[in-house]
Amino acid sequence: MKSIQSKIVDKDNFGKFGEVVKFPTGRTTSQDITYKFWSNIANYKIEGKTEIGICTVYKQDENIIEGVERHLHTPEILIPIDAPFVLPLLKEGEPDDNIESFKVEIGEAVIVNESVWHGACLPVGKDSASYFVIFRLNTPVEDVEKKSISPTLIET
């Protein structure tokens, strides 16, 4: 069985799968003594209405994934709520052995591009992790393609 080590997500290593959103360090768009606001720190395009869901995932004895899914008509935005998570990803057309995994911390978000294969997130450091899922309305019933992959152990 293949085993892969998760990477700390950054713009360079995640770029072929989508976009990373981290707390900005540059100049604010607007600020006052009561707030600071950074605009336009990430972009994505979704046709039509969107939905926000919450997914909770649970720690397993071993983080083995044997399947992935993708969405052809929407990017997917994932935002950790109560714990970091690890996200397995595979680019369309690449062999299963090219699967990669990224650790996303609370306060960060990732935008997974359309057509990118992904596994369910895996909790890090806790028995469970919940995260916001944002994508096109009705994606779970209208735009999910699944496939099996070679069993892969994800090291968090």
Image (cartoon, helix red, strand yellow):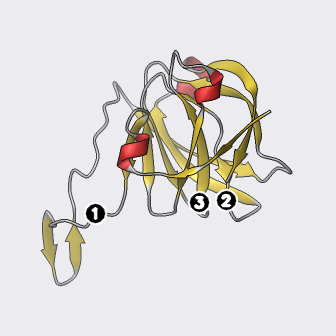
Residue placed under numbered mark 1 in the picture: 24
Tell me which amino acid carries mark 3. Pro
Tell me which amino acid carries mark 2. Val
Q: List x then y, in percent, for residue 141.
A: 60, 22
Does residue 99 lie above or below 131 as drawn? above
Q: Separation of disc 2 and disc 3 at Cα?
A: 5 Å
Q: Separation of disc 1 and disc 2 at Cα?
A: 24 Å
Q: List x then y, in percent, for residue 112.
A: 45, 36
Q: Residue furthest bottom?
A: 33
Left or right of 38 on screen, residue 87: right
Give the position of the C terminus as an image quadrant. Answer: bottom right
Residue placed under numbered mark 2 in the picture: 124
Does residue 103 lie above or below 94 as drawn? below
The answer to the question of whether label 2 and label 3 lie on touching residues, with beta carbons closer than 8 A, is: yes
Q: Nearer the viewer, residue 106 or 73?
A: 106
Mark before the other along the chain sequence, 2 or 3: 3
Label 2 residue SS:
loop
Residue placed under numbered mark 3 in the picture: 84
Tell me which amino acid carries mark 1. Pro
Q: Report the residue at 61% width, 54% height from top.
A: 85
Mark before the other along the chain sequence, 1 or 3: 1
Left or right of 9 on screen, residue 2: right
Mark before the other along the chain sequence, 1 or 2: 1
Q: Separation of disc 1 and disc 3 at Cα?
A: 19 Å
Q: List x then y, in percent, for residue 92.
A: 51, 19
Q: Nearer the viewer, residue 47 or 103?
A: 103
Q: Residues within 10 Å of mark 2 (few under 14, many from 20)?
A: some
Q: List x then y, in percent, for residue 111.
A: 42, 40
Does residue 137 lie above or below 63 as drawn? above
